[in-house]
Image: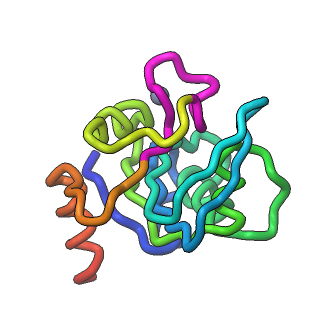
Amino acid sequence: MPMIFCVSASDAPSSPGAYVLWLQLGAPLDVRIGKISATLPAGDYLYCGSAKGPGGLRARLARHMRKNKRAHWHVDQLTFVAKALGAFVEEGGDECALNAALDDLPVPIAGFGSSDCRRCAAHLRFWPEGAALPSRWENARKAARFT
Ligand SMILES: [Zn+2]
């Protein structure tokens, strides 16, 4: 399936698939995963996940973009305070394949968001300012800007 970029959750399909949420931290944030605590510097982050439950990608992204919720996943620590700038979405896609396409981007905290994954070092990437994403990602972002 083609990749699309959604500015808001309502742009996303209600079918299952994988997504990469674009989050922006305005200030450093202390996070905990299990017994480890670490500080994420201010800046842009990409979080890879998959949505297989009812409501599919749309429902999952709506939850990520909402502040009023009970903490459940590692990434909730970010979504409570970070600005959600949109999401790359692939219907029927695989979160680990999307994450692998971002291999050039640094992993800020090993294991973040990937407790149930054996393939990836983490499902969260730091996105340094000006760092290019793969071309089909950049194309999806450009296409969203003009619709
Ligand atoms: Zn993975």
**134 or 2: nearer the viewer:** 134
Q: How many marks?
A: 0
The residue sitting at 80% across, 69% down in the picture is: 68
Q: Is residue 18 above or below residue 121?
A: below
- Residue extending farthest to the top is 118
The residue sitting at 55% across, 73% down in the picture is: 26
Residue 4 in percent (x, y) is at 32, 60
The prevailing secondary structure element of the residues shown in magenta is loop
| Left or right side of 139 for 11 | right
| Left or right side of 139 for 81 | right
Q: Is residue 17 something one can see in this rendering?
A: no
Q: Is residue 95 above or below residue 10?
A: above
Query: Residue 119's image quarter?
Result: top left
Query: Residue 128's image quarter?
Result: bottom left
The residue sitting at 49% across, 49% down in the picture is: 47
Look at the image and tell me in which quarter the N terminus lies. top left
- Magenta highlight range: 111-125
Residue 129 in percent (x, y) is at 30, 65
| Left or right side of 21 for 61 | right
Residue 118 covered by magenta stretch: yes
Q: Is residue 134 something one can see in this rendering?
A: yes
**54 or 147: nearer the viewer:** 147
Look at the image and tell me in which quarter the C terminus lies. bottom left
Colour scheme of the rendered structure: rainbow
| Left or right side of 15 for 53 | right
The residue sitting at 50% across, 73% down in the picture is: 8
Q: Is residue 130 above or below residue 1?
A: below
